[in-house]
Amino acid sequence: MDGGMDTPAQAGSDGASVDRQLARRLSTGDTKALTEIVRKWTAPLERYLSRLCGRCRGDRDEILQEVFLKVYRHANLYDPSLPFSAWIYRICRNEMASRMRSGKGSMESGEVPDEVAESIWGTVVDLPDAQLSGVEDAHAIGELVNAMPDTFRDVFILRFLEEKDYAEIGDILQENINTVATRIRRAREWFLENAGKRGLVDRSARAKRGGR
Amino acid sequence: MATDLEGRLLERIDQERIRPYPRWVGWLTRGASGAAIAAALACSTLASSVFFLWVVQGADPGPHRGFRWVMIGLLPWLSLASAALLSWIGWRLFRRTGTGYRRRAWVVTGIFLVVSLAAGAGLQVGGGLFAIHRVLAMESTTYREFFQGRRSMEWSRPEEGRLAGIVSARSARSLELVDPRGRTWTVEGAVPEWVGIGMEIRLEGRTESDNHFAAERIDRFGPGAGSGRMHRGSEGKGCQP
């Protein structure tokens, strides 16, 4: 629970009751609780925002400010049956989406660092004998993620970059878990197909995997 | 970074005097959602009930009855489609509640539809639909005019021995009806069994006194009646005042 060192997954499970307590304190207008929430969630949310929107770096602070103010304002509307992490991620995503609608942000330019690209490759492709032709080119993988249709990109980032489980993704996107599973599967298929087109996945390896 | 952000946040909260929304805002939001869902369910139930009414009344347009009767024949299905549409609206509203999105669309829509069909059937069989219809027919001129239409207005001339209206109460020997002008009549005479509360009927006979009518013949207006041709009334079965 120390600062922003927790991964979102840890924060979602181990710190759930602490988060709920903080939310309860927040609902009484306790600004110290807000400070604790800010310390804990700034790093994960900043990372999430950077993956959603790379070019709006200057706006990230502004977005985060709005997110935490919304958390503070809506503390009494928080439903404790929902994981706090899902709630705060949802607010963050909605804030980002509303900025995009008003033309202040762009979803086409998320950042995918090299190590994340390799992690995506390992998780998504998951082929023991895959020929990782050009996998070192993390930039190409980043481009692929950014080129994804929004409905796939949303779940793809949450699943493979933020490492959220299906239920939490459902809570963030306010979608049924089956819908989330379907979107993740299609996003993965889209990724593999386009990685193949760009020569990132060896065709023979994909054929072994079942023709995808 | 975090410290800067904290500082700026606290400054804004202080400057703009931002406070968490009071607890009742949450209750109000949830209450409004619940009310909207209940309203969708009630409307869907009503539509289902109307569907069962048309099915029970057997609104068969029959051949060569023209466009109007084709439309009347379609009404049961329009009612059913309305019930399905309202159930879907119910799902959309339910989805916006706390964790409503976790349920599957077709499951929730299906539950809404099944509940509204069951409640609609109950409402129709239990007489609730007629009770609503009766209240509306008695209280609302617009509803009465819409429901009864021009033909009732044209037919209903008590001074010439013709009366039309919606049955608001009945017994074996008399009934009460509201005519298209909103006047309540007590009708004396043997009342056929098919006459039900909320039904639109037309009568032939004579006006005995203010608001009292002696019926010699009772026919049915409305869908399935074929302007009196499909459901023959009580001609030759007494109906003596």
Image: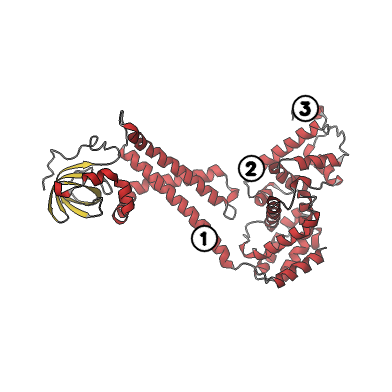
Residue B201, x across and y down, in percent:
23, 44
Q: What element carries label 3?
A: helix
Q: Which chain carries label 2?
A: A
Residue B95, x across and y down, in percent:
57, 50
Q: Name the residue under label 1.
A: B31
On the same chain, marks 1 and 3? The answer is no
The residue positioned 46% from the left and 50% from the top of the image is B41
Relative horizontal placement of residue B42, taking residue A77 as reference (left or right):
left
Foreground label between 1 and 3? 1
Of callouts 2 and 3, the N-terminal one: 2
How many other residues sit within 10 Å of disc 1, few (<14), some (14-19) or many (≥20)?
few
Q: What kind of residue is marked 3?
A: Ala
Give the alpha-carbon distance from disc 2 to disc 3, as whole Å: 27 Å
Residue A208, x across and y down, in percent:
78, 28
Relative horizontal placement of residue B106, taking residue A33 as reference (left or right):
left
Q: What kind of residue is marked 2?
A: Thr
Foreground label between 1 and 2? 1
**Where's the C terminus of chain A, which quadrant?**
top right
Residue contact at pointers 1 and 2, CB within 8 angstroms: no
How many other residues sit within 10 Å of disc 2, few (<14), some (14-19) or many (≥20)?
some
Quarter assignment of residue B7? bottom right
Residue B121, x across and y down, in percent:
37, 45
Q: Name the residue under label 3.
A: A207
Q: Mark 2 points at which residue?
A: A179
Give the alpha-carbon distance from disc 1 to disc 2, as whole Å: 28 Å
Q: Mark 3 lies on which chain?
A: A
Give the vertical position of A134 relative to A102 (above or below): above
Relative horizontal placement of residue B10, taking residue B78 as reference (left or right):
right
Q: Mark 1 lies on which chain?
A: B
